[in-house]
Structures are given as structure tokens and as C-alpha cells.
Image (cartoon, grey):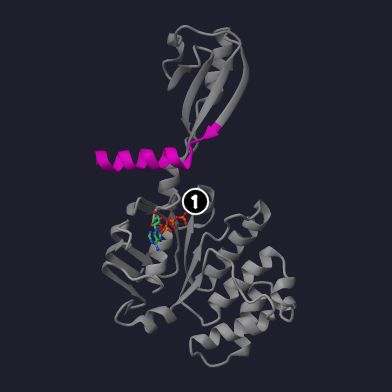
């Protein structure tokens, strides 16, 4: 598939001296959903802002739909729709006016049929005459997306589309993004949430401290990330791990009061039920069980280690 965005050797040092991006190379393919995953301050917004022409790069090159973002800013910017992190819009404007106006900002001729399609696709058509301040939070987000799509961009950036949004609204947003992709728009979103990348993305890039440490197909990445820890709280403490448990990756914790087992959630057999059965056979009683997903932080640490080792 052809690339629609090419980022090469991109660096950014802010005036404060802070280096927010370190020599980032990335190709985004036309028609894909790409998730940029990273903790706070990793450099996600900086990267998007540079590609969209809102922040100047310190070095490197970016092209969008064949247009250099510096030499041909207008060409590249007109290929992009941006939904920023902060929701801001003209509270007293009516939905249809604000979306029509956004299209005009890009010098595109008026096209009522297209604006109607965008509003219908986003389930905003019935609300087209409402003032923005009268809408729910979820609808305001949709208006931001409609504005970003109003000039028919080929690429849509969503900067943390579901930050601070409840679970139901998050699912709606995921569905919406998938539907938008069906219309042929390439989508790049930033997120802190692994599950968001898991739900939506075709490929995932992990950024940490300004470095793009990994870019992978989502399915391959989820295999790496799919580790869980099972904690078995014992009725009576153990001194050592019984030899019969040698086949499982277990360790004793909390002065022998807990057994911790790390397993791969994607494996055909996780080993959880056979482990519990074996404990039963050995007469080892337990009073509680809980499982925990590896935290994003753990995953980053382990990815960074893996990168260094490689
Ligand atoms: N205008 C600026 N001047 C100086 N430093 C900045 C500026 N903007 C961002 N930074 C710093 O650059 C780093 C990357 O910030 P950025 O907003 O790109 O991260 P992010 O990955 O989007 O984080 P978040 O998930 O919190 O939005 C941070 O350490 C931030 O403090």
C-alpha cells in the first residue's frame, strides 16, 4: 500500500532546551488506522502538531500526500483534518454554520450536499440547527470531528479522542472511527489506552521520551502485551515453591502467603486451570485469587529493555 505520510529524521527541541522528539522515522499507509501509544509527555502531541504545521520542526522532513509540510504548507495542511485534544468551539454557533464555515477556511467552494453527508454520518443531522452549547459532551466531540472533515481531508488526526470520556461514549467513538475508515480516510490517533489501540488500530507505534521505540501490526503487538499476573492468596504460607509447580512460571510473594503466576493471555492454554488443579491435588488451600493486566508502564519498561537488548 502507498504511504500517505512520510516522516524522516524528525526532531524537535523546544526553546526550553527540552528535546521532545528524537530522530523519528515513520510511514503511514493510506487507508489505515494508526495508533500512536505513549505515556504522558512522550511526544505524541508534538509530533501531530508538527505534521499539522502548528509547531516548527527542529530537523528532519515530513510529507503529507506528497506535499512537504514546510515548503508546501498549504498543500499538506489541506490534506489534513485535525481533532485536537481540547474541545473548543463556538458555543453560540449553530452546528451546520460552524461546520460550513470550517470548510470555507480551507478555501473550498461551498458544498451543502457534502456537509449534509458529514453531519448524517456523524448522527448530527437532526441537531444541525442546535446551538453547540445545547449539545451533550459526546455530540460536541462529533461536531469537532465534523469540522475536521468539512474540507474533505485524506488524513484525520484524533488527539486522544476518548480522554475523560465514559465507557459507553468511548465505544461509540470507536465505532465511529471504524465507519470513517470505511469512507477511505486514513486515521491517526493518539492514546494512553492499550485497549483503545487494541480495539481500533491496524498498526500501533509506541513512543516513549521522544523516541519511536516500536511500530508493529496490532495483532503482533498484542501478543507481546498480553501478559497477566495471577495472584493466589494462600490459606497457609509456604516456605518454598513445591517441585510439582516447576512447570509454571510462579514465585512466592508476601512472605510465602501468595503465589504469583505470570501468564500469556493470548496462549491457547494459559495454564491457570491446571495450576489450580495441581494446588488442589497437593492439598494447598487458597482463600483468594485475582488477576491483573500488566500496566502500560510495565509494558513500556519491558519494551525499552527489549529494544536495548536487541
Ligand atoms: N511549548 C513547549 N515548550 C517546552 N516544552 C514543551 C512544549 N510543549 C510540550 N513540551 C514538552 O515536550 C514533551 C512532550 O510533550 P507532548 O505534549 O508532545 O507529549 P504527549 O505525548 O502528547 O503527552 P500527553 O499524553 O500528556 O498529551 C513534554 O515533556 C512537554 O512538557
**Dominant secondary-structure state across the stretch colored magenta:** helix
How far from the left and from the top, in percent, is residue 278? 53, 14
Image quadrant in which you'd find residue 100: bottom right
How far from the left and from the top, in percent, is residue 228? 50, 33
The structure residue drawn at horizontal position 53% and vertical position 93%, both measured from the top left corner, is 109
Image quadrant in which you'd find residue 29: bottom left
Verify whether residue 8 appears in magenta.
no
The structure residue drawn at horizontal position 38% and vertical position 79%, both measured from the top left corner, is 76
Q: How crowded is mark 1: few (under 14 residues within 10 Å), some or many (20 or more)?
A: some
Q: Where are the magenta residues, as a range?
A: 292-310
Of the four image quadrants, the one with ligand 1 is bottom left
Mark 1 vs ligand 1: CB below 8 Å? yes
Verify whether residue 301 appears in magenta.
yes
Q: Nearer the viewer, residue 119 or 40?
A: 40
Q: Name the residue under label 1.
A: 192
Residue 28 shows in this picture: yes
How far from the left and from the top, in percent, is residue 19? 31, 56
Amino acid at each position: 500500500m502507498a504511504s500517505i505520510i512520510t516522516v524522516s529524521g524528525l526532531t524537535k527541541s523546544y526553546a526550553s532546551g527540552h528535546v521532545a522528539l528524537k530522530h523519528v522515522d515513520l510511514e503511514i499507509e493510506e487507508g489505515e488506522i494508526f495508533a500512536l501509544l505513549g505515556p504522558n509527555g512522550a511526544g505524541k502531541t508534538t509530533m501531530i502538531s508538527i505534521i499539522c504545521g502548528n509547531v516548527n520542526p527542529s530537523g528532519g522532513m515530513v510529507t503529507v500526500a506528497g506535499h512537504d509540510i514546510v515548503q508546501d504548507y498549504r498543500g499538506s495542511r489541506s490534506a489534513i483534518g485535525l481533532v485536537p485534544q481540547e474541545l473548543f468551539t463556538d458555543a453560540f454557533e449553530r452546528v451546520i454554520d460552524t461546520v460550513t464555515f470550517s470548510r470555507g477556511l480551507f478555501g473550498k467552494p461551498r458544498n451543502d450536499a457534502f456537509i449534509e453527508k458529514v453531519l448524517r454520518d456523524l448522527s448530527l443531522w437532526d441537531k444541525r440547527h442546535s446551538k453547540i452549547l445545547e449539545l451533550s459532551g459526546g455530540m460536541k466531540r462529533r461536531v469537532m470531528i465534523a469540522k475536521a472533515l468539512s474540507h474533505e481531508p485524506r488524513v484525520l488526526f484524533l488527539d486522544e479522542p476518548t480522554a475523560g470520556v465514559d465507557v459507553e461514549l468511548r465505544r461509540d467513538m470507536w465505532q465511529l472511527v471504524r465507519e470513517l475508515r470505511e469512507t477511505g480516510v486514513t486515521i491517526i490517533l493518539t492514546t494512553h489506552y492499550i485497549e483503545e489501540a487494541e480495539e481500533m488500530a491496524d498498526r500501533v507505534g509506541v513512543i516513549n521520551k521522544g523516541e519511536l521505540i516500536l511500530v508493529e501490526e496490532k495483532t503482533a503487538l498484542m501478543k507481546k502485551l498480553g501478559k497477566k499476573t495471577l495472584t493466589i492468596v494462600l490459606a497457609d504460607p509456604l516456605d518454598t515453591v513445591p517441585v510439582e509447580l516447576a512447570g509454571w512460571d510462579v514465585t512466592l510473594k508476601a512472605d510465602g502467603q501468595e503465589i504469583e503466576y505470570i501468564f500469556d493471555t493470548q496462549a491457547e492454554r494459559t495454564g491457570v486451570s491446571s495450576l489450580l488443579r495441581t494446588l488442589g491435588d497437593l492439598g494447598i488451600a487458597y482463600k483468594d485469587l485475582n488477576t491483573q493486566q500488566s500496566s502500560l508502564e510495565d509494558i513500556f519498561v519491558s519494551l525499552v529493555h527489549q529494544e536495548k537488548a536487541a
